Amino acid sequence: MSGEALNRIMAQAAEAEALQQEMEDAFAAFLSDCHYPVGKNGEVMQSTYFVTHVAYHMVRCGWRPSASPVIKKRKVDAPGVVEDAVEWVDVNAPDDPLAGVEQMTFAQISALPEYLRRKAIRRLGGTVDVDDDLPQMAEPAWQVTPNISYSTEQPSGEDFTKTNGAAQ
C-alpha cells in the first residue's frame, strides 16, 4: 500500500470519527432541549420515554442545533414537583427566579406562585409560619407506582452511521 493510499484511508477514518462525534454531540443537545418540552399553548410534555428514539432518528436525518435559542431551562425547586422539573424561560431571564426579590413590591411578591412566595418571604428574613397567610402546602392527593420499562442505553457514534437495514 502506498503512502498516498494510507493517508487517504486515515483521512477517511478521521472524517468518519469526526462525524460520529458531531452526531453524539447533537444527540446530547437534542435530549437536553427536549427535557419537559413546552407547546405553544403552555402544555408541558413528559418526553422521557420516547425522546431517545426521536433524537436518534432526527440526528441521523441531519438535525443539528443551528439557531440562537430564545428560551432556556430553569430548575423548578418546589414541593410536590418531580426532582428534575424545569421551566422554560426567556434566554435573558435570571437563573434564580427570585433574583432582585429585595426590590420587589408586596404586589409583585403576592403575584408569585405559592412556593416562590414562601421562598421570597424566607429570603427576606421572614418565617413563612408567622409572616404569611398562605394555606399550608398540601401533600399530593394521589400517588402512582409506575411500572414502565425502557432502555437508557445511549447510542454511540458508530450507531448513528449504521443503516440498520434502511435503503441506501
Image (tube, grey):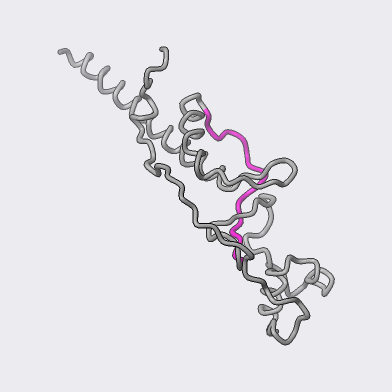
Task: State the residue lying farthest toward the right.
Answer: 107
Q: Is residue 14 above or below residue 76?
A: above
Residue 119: x %, y % from top left? 67, 74
Along the viewing direction, whichever of 158 and 82 lies nearer the viewer: 82
Question: Which quarter of the rendering shows the C terminus?
Answer: top left
* Horizontal side, residue 79 vs residue 154: left or right: right
Q: How many marks?
A: 0
Task: State the residue lying farthest toward the left.
Answer: 1
Residue 143: x %, y % from top left? 56, 61
* Horizontal side, residue 74 vs residue 104: left or right: left
The quadrant in which residue 139 appears is bottom right
Along the viewing direction, whichever of 89 and 164 lies nearer the viewer: 164
Residue 13: x %, y % from top left? 29, 24
- Could you tell me what secondary structure mostly forms the magenta stretch? loop
Task: State the residue lying farthest toward the bottom.
Answer: 130
Queried whether the magenta region covers residue 67, the answer comes back as: yes
Query: Which residue occupies 62% across, 49% down?
Result: 72
The quadrant in which residue 79 appears is bottom right
Q: Is residue 20 above or below residue 131?
A: above
Query: Which residue occupies 63% across, 42% down?
Result: 69
Queried whether the magenta region covers residue 93, the answer comes back as: no
Q: Is residue 118 above or below residue 39?
A: below
Question: Which quarter of the rendering shows the N terminus?
Answer: top left
* Horizontal side, residue 9 vs residue 28: left or right: left
Along the viewing direction, whichever of 96 and 145 lies nearer the viewer: 145
Query: Which residue occupies 34% across, 25% down?
Result: 16
Query: Which residue occupies 61% across, 61% down?
Result: 76
Q: Which residues are magenta?
A: 63-78
